[in-house]
Amino acid sequence: MILQDDQWRRLEQLLSAKSGYSETRAKNNRQFIEALLWLIGSERSWHELPARFGKWNTVYVHFRRWNAANLWDELLADLHADDELRAVIEKICAYGKQRNLRSKYRSGMTAAVAAEGDSDQHWLRLVDGSLP
């Protein structure tokens, strides 16, 4: 999915009004948001991002920062009058929330493994299904 010019103008105005986020004034934010839309729409992994969007790791770090700062939810709240653009940002917002859940799950599994102490016991419990 690619942003229409009029959608980008509205979104650019909202981004420029956000204080405290230096990246919201970056010149390549349209490319960044279109990269996210490509990623979400294609259901591909980050490292498969086409080169035209820039380095995948740069886009990923940018996304993580905006997601951690709750910027997607803020944009969503500001887009109450524009249903089409709101639907675009909702997709990104949902993707961000999904990524947050994955991170929490992974960190919880890491903590469970660390608390286990004896790695042999951990693997045995994992195989027999007794590990939560």
Image (cartoon, rainbow, N blue to C red):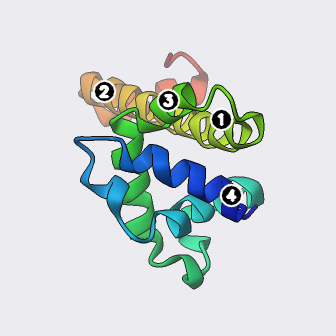
Q: Is residue 112 above or below residue 123?
A: above
Q: Are marks 4 and 2 in contact (CB under 8 Å)?
A: no
For marks 4 and 2 on the same chain, the one whose residue lies earlier in the sequence: 4
Closest to the observer, 40 or 45:
40
Mark toward the viewer: 1 or 4:
4
State the CA–CA distance, disc 2 to disc 3: 29 Å
Real-space Cα distance between discs 1 and 4?
Answer: 18 Å
Residue at 55 percent of width and 49 percent of height = 11
Circles 2, 3 touching at the beta carbon (< 8 Å):
no
Look at discs 2 and 3 and give the one toward the viewer: 3
Q: CA distance from mark 4 to mark 2?
A: 47 Å
Q: In the rendering, which numbered label is found on residue 5?
A: none
The kind of residue on which mark 2 rests is Ala
To which residue does mark 3 refer? Answer: 73
- Give neighbour class at mark 4: few <14, some 14-19, many 20+ (Cα, 10 Å): few
Q: Which mark is residue 6?
A: 4
Q: Nearer the viewer, residue 90 or 17?
A: 17
Q: Earlier in the sequence, mark 1 or mark 2?
A: 1
Q: Tag 4 or tag 3, which sits nearer the N-term?
A: 4
Amino acid at dot 1:
Glu
Q: Position of residue 76 (x, y in %)?
A: 56, 31
Q: Nearer the viewer, mark 3 or mark 4?
A: 4
Q: Nearer the viewer, residue 53 or 99?
A: 53
Quarter holding the N terminus is bottom right
Question: Label 2, on which residue?
Answer: 111
Which of disc 4 and disc 1 is earlier in sequence?
Answer: 4
Name the secondary structure under disc 4: helix
Q: State the separation of the CA atoms marked 3 and 4.
A: 21 Å
Read off the residue under disc 1: 90
Q: Position of residue 45 (x, y in %)?
A: 61, 61
